[in-house]
Amino acid sequence: MSGSAGVMALVLAETVAGAATFLWLTPLWHEVKRGYFTLTGVILSGLALAAWRAAAAGAVGSDRWGTWSVRLALASAIAILAWTGLQLAKRNGAARVIGSGSVPVALAALVAMAGTGRQHEALALFELVAGAAFLGSVLDGLLLGHWYLTDRGLTREPIDRATRIMLVAVILDAVAVIAGGFSGVGSSEAFNPLLTAGALAPWIALGMVGTTALIAVMVKATLRGTRASAVQSATGFFYLAVVTAFTAEVAVKVRFLPR
C-alpha cells in the first residue's frame, strides 16, 4: 500500500481490530446491556468499511500483501456487519459467536498490512498491534463513558478496566514509536508538511502519546471519586484521548509504508 489512503487504512484497521478485541475478549458481555454491543457494532461497521475502501485505494497492484490487506479488510467489515445485524435482530447468541470470530479476522488484516511496511515484518506487526491496543482502548473508554448515561446500574469495573488497559497500551505504543526509529525516511507528501519533514513525525507521535498518557492518569484519578459525575468527567478526558491517540498514530504511520 502507499500514499495517504494506505496510511488511513492502517490507522482505521488498527482501530477496528483493537476495539473489537476489547469488546469481545473482555467480560463486557456479562456486564453491560446488549444495546452497548449494538452501538459499538454500528460504529465499527462504519470504520471497517472505511478501512476496506482506504486499503483498496492505497493498494499497489504488484504487492501481494497489499492485495491480502484489501481482502482481509473486506472480510473484517463483512463479519462486523453480520454480527451488528444480528444484534439489531436480537439474535444475541449468534451475534456473540460471529463477533468473537470477527476478532481473528480483524487481527489477520493487521498481519497482512505488516507485510506492506518498510521494516521487518515482525517489528511492523508489533507497531500495528500496539497501535490497535492504543486506539481500541481509547475508543472503548469513550463509548463506555457514554453508556453509563443510559445504564445507571452499571458498576465502575468496565470503565476502570478500560482505563487500566489504556495505561498499558500507552506504554506499548510509546515503545512501538521508539522502535520505529527517528531517522528521516521517505513518506507521502499528501499529508501536512510537518509530518513529512525529515524526522519530525515520530517526535510529534511521541509527544501525542505522552499527552495521552497524561490524560490516562487524569482519567484514573477522576474515577477515584464516588459521585456519578466522575464518570462524566472521565468521558470528557476520553474525548481528548481519542484526538491525541488518533493524531499520534497518523503521525507515526506516515513513516510506516515504504512510499
Image (spheres, rainbow, N blue to C red):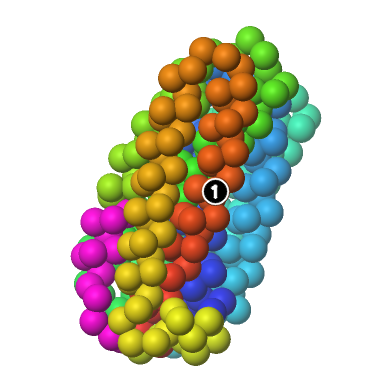
Q: Is 73 placed above or below 33 here? A: below
Q: Seen in the image, is 207 located left or right of residue 2?
A: left
Residue 179 rendering spot, x and y as whole percentages = 21, 65
Bounds of the magenta span?
173-185
Residue 147 falls left or right of residue 18: right
**Viewport quadrant of the C terminus:** bottom left
* Residue at (27% x, 59% y) in the render: 176
Residue at 49% across / 73% down in the picture? 7
Residue 174 is a magenta residue: yes
Query: Which residue is located at x 35 percent, y 54 percent?
Result: 210
Q: Residue furthest right?
A: 89
Disc 1 packing (10 Å; few <14; some 14–19; many ≥20): some
Which percent across, then down, holds residue 174? 29, 56
Observer-nearest of 52 and 213: 213
Report the residue marked by disc 1.
Answer: 240
Quadrant of residue 209 within the rendered picture: bottom left
Of residues 100 and 219, the one nearer the viewer is 219
Compare residues 220 and 97 and report the one nearer the observer: 220
Q: Position of residue 150 (x, y in %)?
A: 72, 22
Residue 60 visible in the snapshot: no
Does 225 appear above or below 142? Answer: above
Residue 201: x and y, percent?
38, 75
